Image: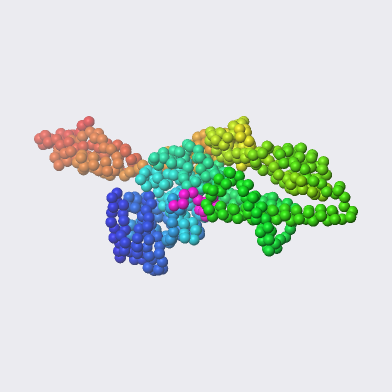
Amino acid sequence: MITYRLSFLKGSVMMIEVGTMLNNRYEILEKIGEGGSAMVYKAKCHILNRFVAVKVLKDEFSSDAEFVEKFKKEAYAAASFSDNNIVNIYDIGTEGNVNYIIQEFIDGKTLKQIINENGRLEYKDAVSKCRQIASALTCAHRNNIIHRDIKPHNILVTKEGVLKVADFGIAKATDSVTITSTDKVMGSAHYISPEQAKGIYVDARTDIYSLGIVLYEMLTGKVPFDGETPVAVALKHIQEPPVPPRNLNPEVPMALNNIVLKAIAKEPYKRFQTAKEFIEGLDDFSNNLNVEKKSVQDEFTRIMDPIDETTLFRENEINDINNAVKPKNAEVDDLESDDEADKASKEPRSKKNSLSKQKKTLIAVILAIIVVGAIGVIAYTSALGNSPSSTSKTTVAVPNIVGMQQADAKKLIESKGLKFTVAETKNSDKAKGSVIESFPSAGSNVASGSEVRVNISAGPDQPTVPTLEGMDLDSAKQAIQAAGFKVGTVTQQSSDSVQNGYVIDQDPKDGSAADKDSVINLIVSTGPKIKMSTVPDVSTKDKDAAAAAISAAGLNPSISYVQTQDNTLNNKVQSQDPQAGSKIKQGSVVTITVYQYVDNTVTVPSVVGMTQSDAQSALSQAQVSMSVGGTKTTNDSTQDGKVASQDKTGKQQKGTTVTVTIYKYVPPAGNNTNNTNNTNNTVSK
């Protein structure tokens, strides 16, 4: 027995009330969501004692028999496979006018909710989530299912962080109305592929594009294309280049920026060709990122090599050294520049304290090394002085070289029999290339041949070259000028991965320091080299095989139809444009005209003996026309105005004309039999 209760809201949206029991099994507990074509409820399965989600097709779609059939067909197809990143479908059914799908209940949030709550995601998190979605698409595409409505709203995230793609089947069934329901499908319009927007042939690469849009939104907190209407948004997908995500979020690495732009390329053949290929791109990025991170760490380790031979201090020795150098440490702390102090004052106190502790510890260790070294030098010098064999020639006083240019200081130090070594070059307000300080300091007595380490001024702090790769040329020029530099030469170069008008490379590289008003040279993309494709011969193929062959050639198929009454020609290619063998630009459209079988025959009934009006009505219902070809006289008054004969019956072409003769009553003239017979056989035209 069917025990469900329905109510209708404004706009004929069907609502199932709480407590409704579907199939004597699923008890509706609460409404948890609504999409463009369905309402979603939480329910309890009383047989398996578990919670499920019930997706109920809306009333305006339930009344469309063809739509319902597609809805069920795609749902059954989606139920035939499973994946950890796909919402499982358990059951499909119809009760009365209620069409529903029973699927896995996910206790979590949609990816859209997470983006709305958090804004853009950390790029590693976005890559991880994108990989899970691509894994779901790999499974679906392997089973010949195209989702066609990938968007954050259709991606559920469990409390454990597992992503589940939902609405397989419904997306494909609702594809034809995705843009037209303007109050419900704005979300879909933001993620639709250019080929979907054009209404031309689509394949699995349409899901790659939509997933690229989702990754873009996760990285930036925004969709690349927006507008006042769904149609305006769809046109932007077709016509406008996206702003690279790195422009909106500088933390996005260039390699990841390029992955996104490849996924959302306008032409399908320029994208990742499969979801698996998308995953491989993400994995390569993540693996290279780990290698680069390790390389940076190794380089940092090398930079921090000790100034002299490594000395291992015990904990109590470090404490003693720290206590001994506290006054000096305080003086060194006071040398912090105004800029550094300014920055420090703006940092949170906890961070400032942490940095201060780290700085003091580092300075303490360095001073400890200097102190120990100095003690060693003093001890060594003292030993030499006390030695009977020592002479005044074995020690040298370090000359004062602070303020001298590096080359002059080097000559002076070496003239004293000492070794000149540059320890560090750093920014300062002293002249560029001049000595800021020396170790040991001027006046110190050291052994002949000892090393004097110096710090050299790099001059005032230089501005950092901004990241320009991935920007359009105008934006790059503005960024150069805003950073205090000048635009140098702009060289154009073709690129398969960077779209026309965007920066491929720059010199100097981003992150490097350069003098103010330095020139920055740019290499700008002219887009991919024009690649030509040969139009394949599809004249002997059916529609799907022809479209696949055209796509494989790097071209975009477009299909038009011509009607035929020959059933053997149904879905066969009638013609193609351009012709086979033509050389055209990759991505161009090839139009194929396909036969579509239409049965135009109808059965013409016999209308003899009917009145003219009844005959007219009967033939109209049979989808043919009636024409009165003439009259035939009769002495039988009961036949007056009725059909005497017709020229066609049985199977005829729809719309054909049936010519009829109508009886006309003529009273008998006397008893002249011959005259009567002649009258009865006369037809008036």
Q: How many labels does the image show?
A: 0
Q: Where 389 sits versus 543, above or below?
A: below
Give the residue displayed 67% in from the left and 43% down from the top: 426
Give the residue displayed 47% in from the left and 57% down from the top: 157
Give the residue displayed 74% in from the left and 56% down from the top: 372
Q: Where 663 sits versus 396, above or below?
A: above
Q: Quadrant of the C terminus?
A: top left
Q: Where is residue 470 in the image (x, y as percent from the top left)?
A: 56, 40
Q: Which of 619 and 352 is in front in this view?
A: 352
Q: Is residue 311 visible?
A: yes
Q: Where is residue 629 in the image (x, y as percent from the top left)?
A: 25, 34
Q: Where 415 sits versus 10, above or below?
A: above
Q: Residue 500 in magenta?
A: no
Q: Nearer the viewer, residue 613 or 631?
A: 613
Q: Nearer the viewer, residue 491 or 349?
A: 349
Left or right position of 365 against 547: right
Q: In which quarter of the image is the N terminus?
A: bottom left
Q: Is residue 540 visible?
A: no
Q: Position of residue 257 (x, y in %)?
A: 55, 44
Q: Which of 63 and 225 is in front in this view?
A: 225
Tell which residue pokes out farthest to the right in this image.
389
Read off the magenta span: 117-133
Q: Residue 119 in magenta?
A: yes
Left or right position of 226 against 409: left
